[in-house]
Image (cartoon, rainbow, N blue to C red):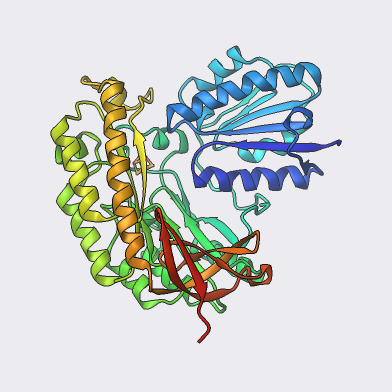
Amino acid sequence: MSNSYKIITYGCQMNVHESEKIAGMLENEGFTPTEDTDNADVVVLNTCCVRESAETRVLGNLGILKKAKERKPDMKIIVCGCMTQADGAAEKLKKRCPFINAILGTHNLYKLPELLHDKAKKTRVEITQEHGINENIPIVRTSGINAWVNIMYGCNNFCSYCIVPYVRGRERSREKNNIISDVKRLIADGYKQITLLGQNVNSYGNDLQEKNENFPSLLRDLSGLEGKFRIKFMTSHPKDIKTETVDAIKESDKLSHFVHMPAQSGSDRILHLMNRKYTAAEYMAKIDMLKNKLSDVGLSGDIMVGFPTETEEDFADTLKLVSSTEYNNLYTFIYSRRSGTPAASMDGQVPITDKKRRIRELIETQFSIGNRLAEKCVGNTYETLCAEYKNGKIIGETNCGKAVTFAGDANLIGQFVNVRITENKNSKLYGAIKNE
Ligand code: SF4
């Protein structure tokens, strides 16, 4: 196949959506997608440097691509994403992998089309620190009836373990009108679930001139749009989620009752070292507000174990917070040193054996909580969006973010149906469409 492309994506949902933009630019240039990486004309690695494991996988894949390029010398290999933007990373990568055609920083993605036609033999590096917003990048959406919309970029929080503010820059909110136009167009195109993306969506609008442009008002405006659709958002920094946001969710039938709010730790001492700017009690107060206002709220979060100096007592506080919160889903991570962040040079790095034991205990604790919560759903009926069809079954998502499997036809995809939960098997929900 000529003019084919393959994108390999690492990291979070923001990167998955960024890859949709990379695909948009490539298809605008006449390229078509392929799964055959070895024979692709262009391979783009959209990298992540938030965790060490993602970085290791990028380097592993580059080793494989080197061999593919020896067999197919005109293959273009382009590396972009967070990993390229970290201090000195692009130069190191260029030295280590001179067969890469281009390395693009997170603020230089729009240069991709130009690089496709670059005949230079040497690796071209395009890294700048300008933090702008490019509204004109085409998008090839790849998530069925789900669409992702960035509402802001960057982060101002500087959690001491996190590289994001250094590689993605400070917070930049998109103009509300542009977001609303995007969402209107997506609804007109038939998308049914739109997820608003930002590192901290609750600080949306803080950098805009217009005083009333904030996250709750954006949510209210979007939920006032015509049509049957659902809006979700992620991620919420616990210090910034406001009562007004939760009220906006409560008052609308278009806003999902699912909230992803990472706690990271349940120990005040560790939270302080992490520069998270809340205590465990303040986090729990936000959880209580969510549960009180939204009786059926679905919660998910992130917890990191093994942050420098974390003791058994600190970890016990984390387990306590996890048990009290009752997350439906929990993303668990082992702390890994990210060079350039304050935590990387902290004393008291925790031995890997302790980190592994703690994460096992955390996963076991969460499994029994998740299973107990899932069991409680049996007998309840939820408005469910039919999202995927596989072997005679539909996989749907309830209004509170729970996945449920039930019998149904492929033509139900994109429709909202009421599903009664009939069974829980190891935290997996099964149900049946309830006809009124
Ligand atoms: S809020 Fe903290 S963890 Fe999240 S992106 Fe910003 S600095 Fe990183």
Q: Nearer the viewer, residue 42 or 35?
A: 35
Quarter occupied by the N terminus: top right
Of all residues shown, which one is farthest toward the right?
2
Q: Which corner quadrant of the image does residue 169 belong to? A: top left
Q: Residue 92 at what x, y percent from top left?
A: 54, 16
Q: Which corner quadrant of the image does residue 375 belong to? A: bottom left
Q: Residue 362 at what x, y percent from top left?
A: 28, 40
Q: Residue 142 at what x, y percent from top left?
A: 65, 52
- As drawn, 426 above or below 392: above
Q: Residue at x 44, y 44 (%)?
A: 154
Q: Nearer the viewer, residue 16 or 428?
A: 428
Q: Residue at x 31, y 68 (%)?
A: 246
Determine the quadrant in which ligand 1 lies: top left
Is residue 405 something one can see in this rendering? yes
What is the count of numbered marks? Answer: 0
Q: Nearer the viewer, residue 348 or 180?
A: 348
Of all residues shown, which one is farthest toward the bottom?
436
Direction from residue 85 to residue 62 in the image, left or right: right
Q: Residue 122 at what x, y percent from top left?
A: 71, 16
Direction from residue 154 to residue 92 in the image, left or right: right
Q: Nearer the viewer, residue 243 or 428?
A: 428
- As drawn, 331 above or below 246: above
Q: Which corner quadrant of the image does residue 216 belong to? A: bottom left
- As drawn, 62 above or below 361: above
Is residue 214 something one can see in this rendering? no
Q: Residue at x 59, y 70 (%)?
A: 184
